Image (tube, rainbow, N blue to C red):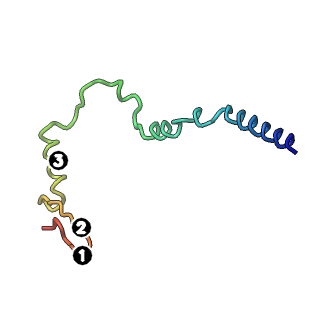
């Protein structure tokens, strides 16, 4: 009985030892999903090759455009209002 138990134990330990030496596919595929997502989001992969200055909208026109964008369709600047509810307290930070 003891010899069968010893053989089974030795065989189990040997099997576990060799199972730990197998190759993992995790290392071979590491980062593939990230690289595929990043490549799918790049509109122009050769954009860094073109070092010419950007031509188009000048600074003053860009400033006016951004200012009108920030003001919105009403033409008035909107301040950010945050309403938080903490327990029974309402309207913290609201104007």
The nearer-to-camera label among 1 and 2 is: 1
Please say if 41 is above or below 46. below
The reply to whether the C-beta atoms of the residues labelled 1 and 2 are less than 8 Å apart is no
**Residue 88, numbered circle:** 1
Where disc 1 sits, the SS reads: loop
Between marks 1 and 3, how big is the CA–CA gap?
A: 43 Å
Between marks 1 and 2, how big is the CA–CA gap?
A: 10 Å
Residue extending furthest toward the front: 2
* Badge 1 density bin: few <14, some 14–19, many ≥20, Cα 10 Å: few
**Residue 65, numbered circle:** 3
Q: Earlier in the sequence, mark 1 or mark 3?
A: 3
Residue extending furthest toward the bottom: 88
Residue in front for this viewpoint, 81 or 77: 81
Where disc 3 sits, the SS reads: helix
* Badge 3 density bin: few <14, some 14–19, many ≥20, Cα 10 Å: few
Between marks 3 and 2, how big is the CA–CA gap?
A: 33 Å
Q: Residue 61's image quarter?
A: top left
Please tell me which residue is depicted at 14% across the width and 60% down the height of the picture: 79
Query: What residue would you read off at disc 2?
Result: 84
Q: Is residue 5 left or right of residue 42?
A: right
Q: Residue 41, percent across and down?
A: 42, 40
Please tell me which residue is depicted at 71% across the width and 38% down the height of the picture: 16
* Badge 2 density bin: few <14, some 14–19, many ≥20, Cα 10 Å: few
**Residue 32, numbered circle:** none
Where disc 2 sits, the SS reads: strand
Residue in front for this viewpoint, 33 or 22: 22
Q: Residue 10, percent across and down?
A: 78, 37
> The C terminus is located in which quarter?
bottom left
């Amino acid at each position: 009985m003891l010899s069968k138990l010893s053989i089974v134990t030795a065989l189990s330990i040997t099997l576990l030892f060799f199972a730990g030496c197998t190759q993992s596919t995790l290392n071979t595929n590491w980062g593939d999903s990230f690289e595929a997502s990043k490549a799918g989001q790049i509109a122009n992969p050769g954009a860094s090759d073109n070092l010419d200055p950007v031509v188009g909208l000048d600074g003053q026109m860009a400033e006016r455009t951004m200012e009108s964008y920030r003001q919105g369709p009403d033409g008035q600047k909107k301040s950010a209002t945050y309403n938080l509810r903490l327990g029974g307290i309402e309207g913290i930070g609201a104007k």
